[in-house]
Amino acid sequence: MSRRTDRINEQLREEISTLLTRQIKDPRLNAVISITRVVSSGDLRSARVYISVMGNQETRDAALAGMQSAASYLRRELRNRINMKHTPFLSYQLDDSLEEADQVLRLMNKVKPEDETTEAPNIPGGD
């Protein structure tokens, strides 16, 4: 991916986050929602927007539905905010990477090395 595409992805992420917090009043979007990343296509005509939602699966699904219903509004607002020849079509997807990372950390914490002891080792001649 080019630096230009990276910059555009970051700008889209910031603008969508701003619009989400300041202008969208959908009750399904009252949960804590983060735009984790945006991945644009090579021609910049479309972009996948990954969202992370705090809450149970029902809350997450409702937030995703709210984002999808606001998609045309968000695209129209982005057209006025970003300087691009074509405003990309946005598709929204739940980002499970944070939950997956949390699950891996929990599993890692359960696994303890077998040679771990709570007592200090007895070193001869250490007196």
Image: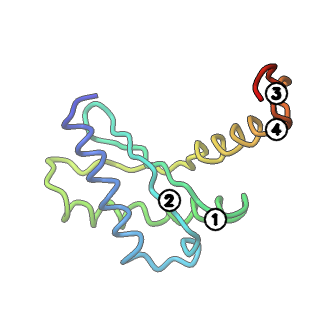
- The percent coordinates of residue 94 (x first, y second) are 57, 50
**Residue ID at (54%, 71%):** 29
Name the amino acid, label 3.
Pro
Name the amino acid, label 1.
Ala
Frontmost of labels 4 and 3 is 3
Find disc 3 in the rendering and name its residue: 121
Find disc 2 in the rendering and name its residue: 68
* Residue 105 as seen in the image, left or right of residue 8: right
- The percent coordinates of residue 90 (x first, y second) are 39, 50
Q: Secondary structure at mark 4?
A: helix
- Are the residues flagged by discs 4 and 3 in contact, CB closer than 8 Å? no
Frontmost of labels 1 and 4 is 4
- The quarter of the picture where residue 57 lies is bottom right
Q: Earlier in the sequence, mark 1 or mark 4?
A: 1
Name the amino acid, label 2.
Gln
**Residue ID at (59%, 60%):** 53
Q: Nearer the viewer, residue 110 or 7?
A: 110
- Are the residues flagged by discs 1 and 3 in contact, CB closer than 8 Å? no
Frontmost of labels 1 and 3 is 3
- Residue 62's mark? 1
- The percent coordinates of residue 21 (x first, y second) are 41, 73
- The percent coordinates of residue 54 (x first, y second) are 62, 62
* Residue 14 as seen in the image, left or right of residue 112: left
Quick one: label 4, few (<14), some, or many (20+) residues within 10 Å? few
Q: Earlier in the sequence, mark 2 or mark 3?
A: 2
- Residue 110's mark? 4
Q: Earlier in the sequence, mark 4 or mark 3?
A: 4
